[in-house]
Image: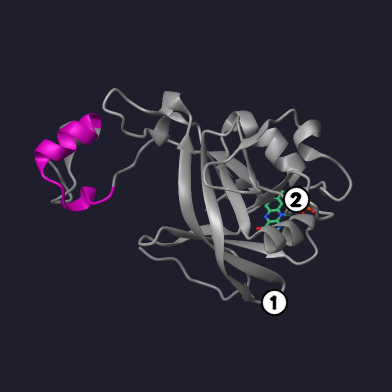
Amino acid sequence: MSVPRIQLNPATVMAPVPVVLVSCRGPEGSEYAKPNLITLAWAGIVCSEPPMVSISVRKSRYSHRQIQESGEFVINLVNEKLLRQTDFCGVKSGRDIDKFAACHLTACPAAAMLHAPAVAESPLSLSCQVRQVLELGSHDCFIGEIVAVEAAADLMDEKNKLCLDRAGLVAYCHGDYRSLGSILGFFGYSVAGDEVLARRMPKKAARRSPAKGKKSD
Ligand SMILES: Cc1cc2nc3c(=O)[nH]c(=O)nc-3n(C[C@H](O)[C@H](O)[C@H](O)COP(=O)(O)O)c2cc1C
């Protein structure tokens, strides 16, 4: 049964969203040529082929200038171990401090990047080249093509498949950081056959047939 709905002011109340740690560096020789980190929640996937992402960064951020000048950034996924440093990188500016040093994080070379480093402690890093910049208002949206991906080796299974469920990733929900709960379903589970359900969600498959939306017992 639906409940009465009320109208709110237009605002960015979309949740949950990812929270990521973006690493960047201005080009060699420029005054922005030091490794830096910025925490972002306004980030997302925007295209599959070519693989592209967006990050929205206020012009006032130190990292904005670094990304604009270098044309590169690295999106580092955030797990529970990295959360405290991630929050810190979202309240301190690289203009004032070296966030890698302050957070005891390692800036390592990122695949396919000339300038931007990756965070060695992150479970997965996406190296991105800026393809477009959209000046939207408060934020500039950098559209980046993912040109390389690097993952922690312990996230790969024996068949060399990436198991991101092992990474302990974190989501951002209306001002709070949240761990991810149990698996509720998977892409296409509502129409999957019994054999697939039994393999992917053995506990649920035993109780229910989601394809039919009915309990099987
Ligand atoms: C959870 C969280 C999410 C944030 N998301 C964004 C964002 O999407 N875009 C942005 O410009 N700033 C965002 N910020 C703020 C920047 O991370 C913050 O201003 C940072 O200190 C900028 O660092 P910089 O000056 O070294 O670039 C976020 C901060 C936090 C804590």
Specify the quadrant that holds the C terminus.
top left
Residue 173 visible: no
Q: Is residue 162 magenta?
A: no
The reply to whether the magenta stretch includes residue 199 is yes
Q: Residue at x 75, y 36 (%)?
A: 100
The residue wearing badge 1 is 137
From this view, report whether residue 102 is shown above or below residue 38.
above
First in residue order: circle 2 vs circle 1: 2
**Horizontal side, residue 202 vs residue 57: left or right:** left
Does any portion of residue 157 appear in the rendered image?
yes
The residue wearing badge 2 is 28
Q: Quadrant of residue 197?
A: top left
Q: Position of residue 41 (x, y in %)?
A: 62, 54
Q: Label 1 sits on what residue type?
A: Gly
Q: Where is residue 171? Give x, y as percent.
A: 55, 45
Say which of 68 and 53 sits in front.
Answer: 68
- Vertical comparison of 6 with 74: above or below: below
Separation of residues labelled 2 and 1 (CA atoms): 29 Å
For image coordinates 76% across by 61% down, the residue present is 65
Write down the region rendered in magenta: 187-203
Q: Are marks 2 and 1 in contact (CB under 8 Å)?
A: no
